Amino acid sequence: MAKGYWIPHLDVSDPEGYKAYMAATPEAHRKYHGHVLVRGGTCETVEGRGRARNVLREFPDYAAALACYNSPEYQANIKVRQPHSVAEIIIIEGYDGPQP
């Protein structure tokens, strides 16, 4: 079964305010067995519009990735994040078929 992924792209306008969001998110992610593959780090936007912060979080499957985002724990935390950042979050199903 293919894994599920969150791909958030963010610009944080208030790093101090954003810390509360960062402290609260692990609870929901652990509950749905998500773990971080990429969190910040050096990057270069080579095409299109980029954001300052990029994350890649892996879940056991697409359903778990969606369930985590829609969970009461995470939905409450969105309200903590929004005053301090702008984000696009993509939830996508991984590919586990033959490589082209």
Image (cartoon, rainbow, N blue to C red):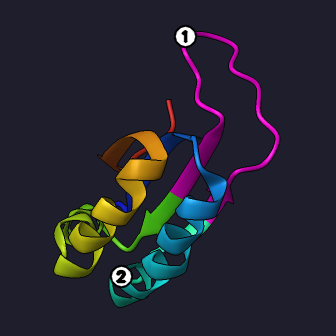
Q: Element type at marker 1?
A: loop
Q: Amino acid at mark 1?
A: Gly
Secondary structure mostly seen in the magenta stretch: loop
Which badge, 2 or 1, comes first in the chain's sequence?
2
Residues in magenta, as a range: 37-56
Q: Give the residue number, with chain letter if any, for mark 2.
A: 28
- Residue 59 visible in the shown view: yes
Figure check: 38 above or below 22: above
Image-based side of 11 in relation to 80, left or right: right
Residue at x 64%, y 55% (from the top left corner): 15
- Residue depicted at x 50% and y 29%: 100
Q: Position of residue 39 (x, y in %)?
A: 66, 57
Residue sitting nearer the eye, 28 or 14: 14
Q: Nearer the viewer, residue 73 or 62?
A: 73
Magenta residue check for 41:
yes
Image quarter of the N terminus: bottom left
Q: Which residue ends up furthest to the right in the rendered image?
A: 42
The image shows residue 25 at horizontal and vertical percentages of 44, 75
| Residue designated by label 1 | 48
